[in-house]
Image (tube, grey):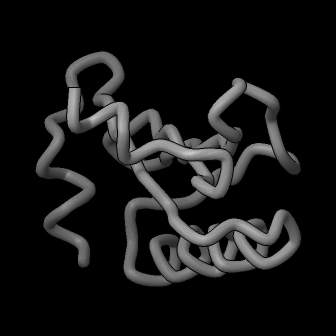
């Protein structure tokens, strides 16, 4: 249960659906309350940069201390298609 104990009221939870060319991310708190609009970003360095800026902005706006990002491939996309772009 250590994974769940890492999520507190000060944790911004980001879920990302990974596709081959374009990804979409949503943010929420530990209760499932969504923050902001979804972030749509390309599978490029500039797209990942946009995604990170979106996270930092939401973290500051919501005064969160931690961020947890979970990623799930959609369709035939492989999880590595996102991580290879770091």
Pick the residue in front: 53 or 67. Answer: 67
Instruction: In the rendered view, tell whether residue 45 sits above or below residue 38.
Output: below
8 relative position to 29: left or right: left
Q: Residue at x 15, y 36 (%)?
A: 78
Q: Residue at x 21, y 37 (%)?
A: 2
Q: Residue 60 location in percent, x, y?
A: 78, 78
Q: Residue 36 location in percent, x, y?
A: 87, 50
Instruction: In the rendered view, tell whether residue 8 sits above or below residue 46.
Output: above
Pick the residue in front: 61 or 73. Answer: 61
Query: Quadrant location of residue 38?
Result: top right
19 relative position to 82: left or right: right
Q: Residue 14 location in percent, x, y?
A: 54, 47
Q: Residue 45 location in percent, x, y?
A: 39, 81
Q: How many marks?
A: 0
Name, please, the residue furthest toward the top.
75
59 relative position to 14: left or right: right
Q: Residue at x 12, y 50 (%)?
A: 80
Pick the residue in front: 67 or 21. Answer: 67
Instruction: In the rendered view, tell whether residue 32 sits above or below residue 57.
Output: above
Q: Residue at x 71, y 26 (%)?
A: 31
Query: Quadrant location of residue 76?
Result: top left
Say which quadrant the C terminus sits in: bottom left
Say which quadrant the N terminus sits in: top left
Instruction: In the rendered view, tell whether residue 3 sits above or below residue 25.
Output: above
């Amino acid at each position: 249960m250590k994974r769940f104990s890492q999520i507190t009221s000060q944790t911004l939870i980001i879920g990302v659906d990974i596709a081959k060319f374009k990804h979409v991310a949503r943010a929420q708190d530990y209760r499932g309350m969504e923050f902001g609009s979804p972030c749509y970003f390309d599978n490029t360095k500039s797209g990942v940069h946009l995604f990170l800026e979106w996270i930092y902005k939401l973290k500051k706006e919501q005064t969160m201390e931690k961020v947890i990002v979970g990623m799930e491939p959609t369709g035939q996309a492989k999880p590595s298609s996102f991580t290879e772009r770091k």
